[in-house]
Amino acid sequence: MKFIVAQVGARRTYAVPAILEKAGMLDRFYTDITGDIGLGAVVSAAAVLPLVGKSARRLAARRLPGAGHSGKSWNA
Amino acid sequence: MLDRFYTDITGDIGLGAVVSAAAVLPLVGKSARRLAARRLPFNIRAKTTTFPGISLVHALREAMVARDPAAACREGVRFSNALGMAMTRRGFGSATHMYSMLGECGPLFAEGKRRGLVTVSEIYVPLSTERILTEERKKFLGWEFNVPDYAAVCRGFEVEHRLSMHADLAICPSKWVRDDLVQNFGLPSERAAVVPYGVNPELFSVRNEPVRGRILFAGTADLRKGIHYFAAAAEKLLVRRVRCEFRVAGNVERSVANQEQCRHLNFLGRVPRAKIRGEFAVADVLVLPSLAEGSAETTYEALACGVPVVTTPEAGSVVRDGIDGRIVPSRDPEALANAIAEIVEDRQKRERMSRAARDRAHDYTWERYGERLLAALRQKFEDRP
């Protein structure tokens, strides 16, 4: 009896796949995103970066004069 | 006179515009912190595949339709379907069985079934929930607005109810969920098993020193959880001069909080997990007059903290009537008020129930949940590959 488990979100802290693995019954586990592997780990790391949240809002407030831009500015 | 202007970064052109746009997205800040809290148990990391691209696109799309409940619901179904298709492309490995939650990721479930895998679906909420709530909203007009027509949203997608009925085994967190499946959806009873949830054993360390008459309602304050019956019971108790404070710890819509009937309720809003322990520590009784739950986890938490529970059969709890709380009929504020008064006014009974509640919770830890889940799977499938 080998299980593939599919679940969206961290329902009950991933109890079902963890229980099946402990019993030697987990073949693979599919889930949407987690905070500790792959791209999810990168995104969640951003939670502690100063760019996120307050700083992003500060950046949003940095506007060049005029509605548009002249085409003479470059971001390095 | 300006030929060109060099600067580090601005919020309105180039990459800076992209980053600053993110300031208004839900993924940023709070949601990123929520994601960071999603940690896999170490033992399953090597066997886990995630689909972050689809998930991040979903987060953006969800943010764009946040003010349109029907569109948000449709996006949720689309997301689940897209995930299922991506999971199907990743394959089934050497699995012989499949476990999914209420038909989530439908295409994976359907393809697994087609390939002959044995399928298990966890039915974490009764399938009659939408019907029950539709009827309740008709009786209590003005309490909930902009509720999407879930059945209409799901048309064209391989989702929940239909797929769950094809599962070889339905794991139900309560007898109430199993009975609903068998009686209202025709699932043969031998294809359903009851596996109650568990509680975090850390809650056993919460010392309950109740403030007499401090009545706690924990969960979203909506019709599904019976906030309107809680409000009606509060009114009855105050008329009878039973001294109580009615505290509601959970999200609440303005359309509910502003109801005249709710004037005796103290809405605390969403209470973080760490702080809810403080509420349990001083609660005299937990009340959950729910109309439809799989098995309300807040009832397990209250038991673990030694708080007697007054609830309904539809909450799917493990509370024993008259031992660690009271089970009263749903939609009956009189019975609800009587049960609350019975516990608040008889301190010896309240003390007995408190002790029994903790004892009861010790049999419903997550460890015991695991044992029960494996036992149900083995009992059903032990003779199959």
Image: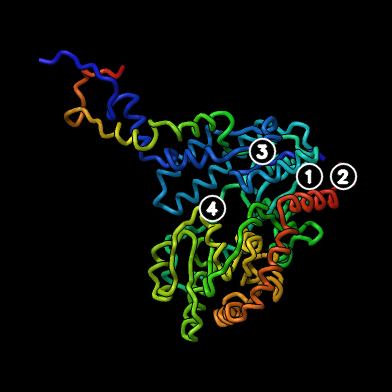
Left or right: B238, with B127 as reference point: left
Q: Are the residues flagged by discs 1 and 3 in contact, CB closer than 8 Å?
A: no
Secondary structure of the residue carrying tag 2 is loop
Q: Of B69 and B158, which appears nearest the observer?
A: B69
Q: Earlier in the sequence, mark 1 or mark 2?
A: 1
Q: CA distance from mark 3 to mark 4?
A: 20 Å
User: Which quarter of the image is occupied by the C terminus of chain A?
Assistant: top left
The residue sitting at 67% across, 53% down in the picture is: B201
- Label 2: chain letter: B
Against B142, residue B32 (above or below) is above
Q: At label 3, which amino acid type do we have?
A: Pro
Q: CA distance from mark 2 to mark 3?
A: 29 Å
Disc 2 designates what residue?
A: B384
Disc 3 designates what residue?
A: B41
Disc 1 designates what residue?
A: B118
Q: Is residue B127 visible?
A: no
Disc 4 designates what residue?
A: B273
Q: Are the residues flagged by discs 1 and 4 in contact, CB closer than 8 Å?
A: no
Expressed as whole percent of the image width and height from the top left, the position of residue B267 reads 43, 65
Foreground label between 3 and 4: 4
